[in-house]
Amino acid sequence: MPRIFLLNESTACRIAAGEVIERPVSIVKELVENSLDAGADRINIAITAGGIEAIEVVDNGCGISQEDTPLAFQRHATSKIKSAADLDDIKTLGFRGEALPSIAAVARLSIKTRVPEKNEGYQMVIKGGQVQQKGPTGCPVGTMISVQDIFFNTPARRKHLKSKSTEGGLITDLVYKLALTRPQAKFAFKHNGREIFRSPGSGKMMDVLASVYDVRTANMMLAVNGHEDGVKLEGFISKPEISRSTRQQITVAVNGRIVRNAAVNMALEEAYRGKLTVGRYPVAVLLIWLPPDKIDVNVHPAKMEIKMENEEQIKSLVTTVTGRALRKTDLIPRQTKLP
Ligand code: ADP
Ligand code: MG
């Protein structure tokens, strides 16, 4: 009969990391979400070789105190919730306290962080869960995390990575989506030292659309706005003249969190029925706001899926509001060429 053993912390951590950190883009997502939760409005992201070689995220958020920095690398250590009751009222993107320990378990992570009250910061280097270096350091207020040697101790994960350009493409798409859902934050994104994208942080989604696409495409987008029974919807959707062959450019965020939600996609596509040919999809950014107690975000470790209590109400709001915007353009006569 095989005996039962309790796994040690570092083994448990590496297993847990498998759920949260699947590929380089997962690291970028977790780091940027932490920056946003820290109130940062300037976030600089730099990756090397599709994020396979290195990832760096620098923010101007609240920073972490010297006492708390080692705690941030312990599993289930978080500043965002205190008890199970708080799970019903999540206002932050993170709450599981798993990202930093998971990343540090499968890579080499270096952090420099400083809180505004202190004139020096604190740094730590952790590789494969082992602290290699720690102590005071000079750095600006905020947090800078760089990650290297990704999956050095999990060769199976490493083998499953796609090409540098595919992994880099996933990160680029994520950065676009994050910037679109947070127009008030100034994002800058570099790949192999070259600037790929920058958003102005003006607070206007239209300005981010113009940076992600181009001014012409941005001008072809229709503003959508509506609310009903405590649910608010805002964003932009493309005129039917612009369409894509995949749903990749439909961005949906619920309470600021980017989610995959088939119901919202269906509701949006319903509004385009008869306006787009089969197999074509709009470009859209839909920000949905609803009372936090109406959603359960604790469904999936990567938190990309959520459960919404009032899904039918949200679907009907999406179809009504987007349908109304599309019908308005029908009324504007297309320009006819003069003979
Ligand atoms: P979670 O985000 O679920 O709380 P993480 O492992 O991602 O868990 O982070 C642990 C803690 O470290 C956070 O709760 C937060 O207090 C702190 N932290 C992480 N990143 C940052 C950052 N960029 N700025 C300030 N604090 C941070
Ligand atoms: Mg987090």
Image (spheres, rainbow, N blue to C red):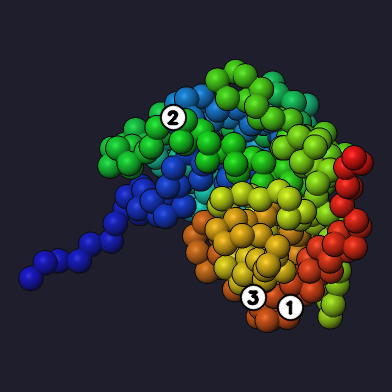
Q: Nearer the viewer, mark 2 or mark 1?
A: 1
Residue 196 screen position, x and y as percent:
65, 27
The amino acid pointed to by label 2 is Lys
Q: Nearer the viewer, mark 3 or mark 2?
A: 2
Label 2 sits on residue? 164
**Residue at screen point 84% across, 39% down:** 207
The amino acid pointed to by label 3 is Met
Disc with the residue nearer the chain's start (2 vs 1): 2
Q: Residues within 10 Å of mark 1 (few under 14, many from 20)?
A: some
Residue 208 screen position, x and y as percent:
78, 40
Tell me, for residue 308, which label it has, or none. Answer: 3
**Farthest top residue in view:** 193
The amino acid pointed to by label 1 is Ser
**Dot 1 lies on which element?**
helix
**Residue at screen point 57% across, 62% down:** 278
**Residue at screen point 55% across, 38% down:** 171
Callouts 3 and 1 close, C-beta under 8 Å: no
Which quadrant of the view contains residue 331?
Answer: bottom right
Q: Is residue 212 above or below residue 82?
A: above
**Residue at screen point 41% across, 29% down:** 149
Disc with the residue nearer the chain's start (3 vs 1): 3
Label 1 sits on residue? 316
Tell me, for residue 134, which label it has, or none. Answer: none
Q: Quarter holding the N terminus? A: bottom left
**Dot 3 lies on which element?**
strand
* Along the viewing direction, whichever of 12 and 320 lies nearer the viewer: 320
Q: Quarter holding the C terminus? A: top right
